Amino acid sequence: MLAELQTSEVEEAQPPSWWAAAACNDSRGSLTALFFSEELADIARAKAICTTCPVREPCLEGALARREPWGVWGGQLFLNGRILPFKRKRGRPPKNRRPEDIEAELIHAELVRAGMVRPGPVPEVVERTA
Ligand code: SF4
């Protein structure tokens, strides 16, 4: 029984089969800080990377099932096991673009140039409301 328990614990510690194909998996964990950042620009960048990811669906399903406490998973920002809703500020868009909007546009343009995402709208950097 102990051997079975140890085996199942080891199996649980293994990454899922789709992890090798994940866009955020560079085998060095160099993107970990980005996916667990509190900075809006970082969150937007992480979400932009998720848009290129071939395993976005199982990643999101797994994060919901595990009730991930924090981080960007499957293109969504999680807090305490739930997807954190984001909403634009009320009123008109700002006259001058914010630095995080500009950065998100630059990152998106790089990803489009690299053929990692299709041309289209830039993932929004919006203000957290909750
Ligand atoms: S969907 Fe995002 S967080 Fe999930 S594996 Fe892909 S890049 Fe990583």
Image: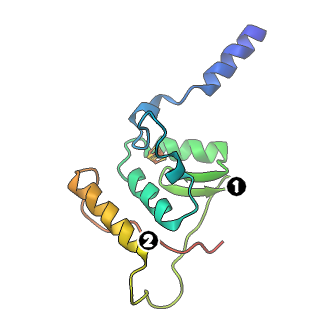
Quadrant of the rendered structure where residue 48 is?
A: bottom left
Label 1, on which residue? 80
Q: Is residue 34 left or right of residue 118?
A: right
Q: Label 2: how many residues lie within 10 Å, few (<14), some (14-19) or many (20+)?
A: some
**Rendered residue at 38%/46% (across/down):** 53
Q: Nearer the viewer, residue 109 or 17?
A: 109
Where residue 15 sits in the image (x, y, percent)? 54, 29
Where residue 46 sits in the image (x, y, percent)? 45, 55
- Asked if disc 2 and disc 1 are in contact, CB closer than 8 Å, the reply is no
Q: Could one spot residue 122 in this view of the protein? A: no
Quadrant of the rendered structure where residue 101 is?
A: bottom left
Residue furthest to the right: 1
Q: What amino acid is labelled 2 in the image?
A: Glu
**Rendered residue at 42%/59% (across/down):** 45
Q: Secondary structure at mark 1?
A: loop
Question: Which label lies toward us, 2 or 1?
Answer: 2
* Residue 52 drawn above or below residue 28: below
Q: What amino acid is labelled 1 in the image?
A: Asn
Q: Secondary structure at mark 2?
A: helix
Separation of residues labelled 2 and 1 (CA atoms): 25 Å
Picture quarter with the C terminus: bottom right
* Residue 92 drawn above or below residue 33: below
| Labelled disc at residue 100 | 2
Which circle's residue, 2 or 1, is located before the other in the chain?
A: 1
